[in-house]
Amino acid sequence: MSILINGIGVSTGIAIGEAYVYSREHQEVHEYNVPVSQQKKEIQRFKAALAKAGSQLHKIKNKIAVDTPADILAFIDTHLLMLEDPTFDEGTVANIKKLSCNAEWALYLQSQRLVKVFDEMEDAYLRTRKDDVLHVVRRIQDCLADAPDHIPDGQQLKGRIIIADDLTPADTLMLQHQKIAGFVTEFGGQLSHTAILSKNIGIPAIVGAHFARQLIKTGEILIIDGLQGMVINSPDKHSLKHYRALQKEEIARKSLLHNLRDAPVVSTDGKVITLHGNIDRPEDIRTLRSFDNTGVGLYRTEMLFIEKNTWPDEETQFKTYKRALFRLKGELLTIRTIDLGADKETQDSVDQGPMAHNPAMGLRAIRRCMKEPESFVPQLRAILRVAALGPVRMMIPMLTNIEELQQVLNLIARVKRQLRTQNIQFDKNIKVGAMIEVPAAALSADAFAKQLDFLSIGTNDLIQYTLALDRIDDEVSYLYNPLNPAVLQLIQMTINAGKKARIPVSLCGEMASNPQYTRLLLGMGLEYFSVQANTLLEIKHIINHSKISRLRPKIKQILEYSSAHEIEIQLNQLNQREAEKYSH
């Protein structure tokens, strides 16, 4: 009898194959006393486990490095760096000495302290970084217990669908190396590293499928639908026939989209649209260019600060931005200045005092930078210097008023004078733009447009601030809706302001990466999109099969509706009609 199991689809596609239930017994950690005379030996045991864990990861990395992109291997590099971080080493050793306890318990206490730091972060992506801590700790604990690695080698897993409680990045890469068909985990969410990796390597995957290991046995035939987040155990003949047909259609669609690589982005009525990608680090450019040779509309520089766990110096930033620019091979690089504060912090900042009562409304992004200009100036210098080497723009986040903008522009002018006096090469004509992600900025878009070279709409924050909600708060997340009429009015105002001032207006939030909204944004007059790499070709396909002159009056009518629900119904109907016109 067929069993239907629901989860969260994190990597689209259909996989059909035999199940392999991957079980790994996790060692239960107990505390016991270690006499002072034995503490040195216990510390040595812990150090040996650290070294063994690092050796295991290096072995995995070397085994799969031949055909794995550097940006994917970066997930293992992150764990290797964590093994070298004093946070793990010195903190655990200090616990052994202070509490006279065993290494397992000392490491457990240290991991709980670190997990608590991440749990208190508001940003969903950063909060999931605690998974890195837990995965590294689990590997060290296994090494302390001399537990074997349970992933089978050779051809045993080829074409199978893996069922597991959770997978580390190293597990996922090893399984992909063995050419599995897909995987299902009982835990995890949309932003877990397992989810991100599955998208990057193109394996159909479902996470959050509770009790999957109890309901599925090794050898049973499974169908997993990565789009719907659905697992069918022991499917009947009709279901198998249906999903095999869908699988063929999916393969054909991927081939069609692949043919769009490097094709121009032009609507059917000849309107040229700019389509760029979003990145967090230079390594992400490899993934972006695997889809298309295009530029970067949003480079979130704060990830460098967070990974370094401090504010890096000018030279470190310059070399990092230079690496990104050179990897783009002449395409545009839009560098957003640091957006720290609120949920994103470095340890040295955390150590200075408690988090603000309402950090999202407090000292973050450009407010934080202007309060600490001595820390901000090295980034401005690095950006101005790298702009002399190729096409680079600077983008300022979270501006709220013209006075704030003028202070920033004055600081940039002062930094330019410093560089000129020091005879250091820089781009004196660098284009400076602003992120429009606060309602006050959208309402003042005309004034901002007169003083800037471009605008970029950050819908993630704009929606939250407009609707006064936290989209990752389960109590109110149902209210998060990009189609809220107030949000759409602010987006339209910003686009209109750019056209009036004859400067580009892009949209770089998640809304730009969602194909559901592409025709809506085109009809509103948006001509510059910056999207996640894995959605780039899908967005390009829609643009290249859209007649913008026909969309404009239809979108204008849709925007006259007064509720998000009505707008969504009308937009879905429009999308369906437009898709049908170009389906043959």
Image (cartoon, rainbow, N blue to C red):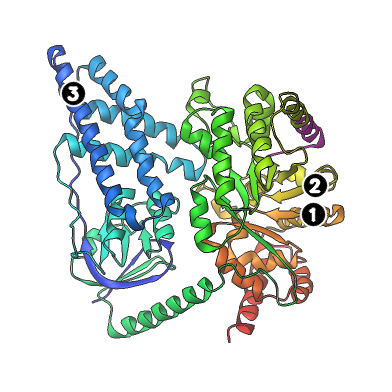
Q: Position of residue 190 (x, y in %)?
A: 44, 54
Q: Position of residue 406 (x, y in %)?
A: 81, 33
Few, some or many C-alpha atoms within 10 Å of disc 3 (few <14, some 14-19, many ≥20)?
Answer: few
Q: Secondary structure at mark 2?
A: helix
Label 2 sits on residue:
443
Label 1 sits on residue:
493
- Nearest-to-viewer mark from 1 and 3: 3
Q: Residue 195, located in which quarter of the rendered image? A: bottom left
Q: Residue 419, located in which quarter of the rendered image? A: top right
Q: Position of residue 443 (x, y in %)?
A: 80, 47
Q: Nearer the viewer, residue 432 or 119?
A: 432
Q: Is the residue 542 above or below the residue 358 in the image?
A: below
Q: Is residue 403 magenta?
A: yes
* CA distance separating discs 2 and 3: 62 Å
Give, as a single range, the part of the protein colored magenta: 396-410
Label 3 sits on residue:
44
Q: Tags 2 and 1 in contact by the CB under 8 Å rule?
A: yes
Tell me the amino acid under the disc marked 3.
Gln
Few, some or many C-alpha atoms within 10 Å of disc 1 (few <14, some 14-19, many ≥20)?
Answer: some
Tell me the amino acid under the disc marked 2.
Leu
Of labels 2 and 1, earlier in sequence is: 2
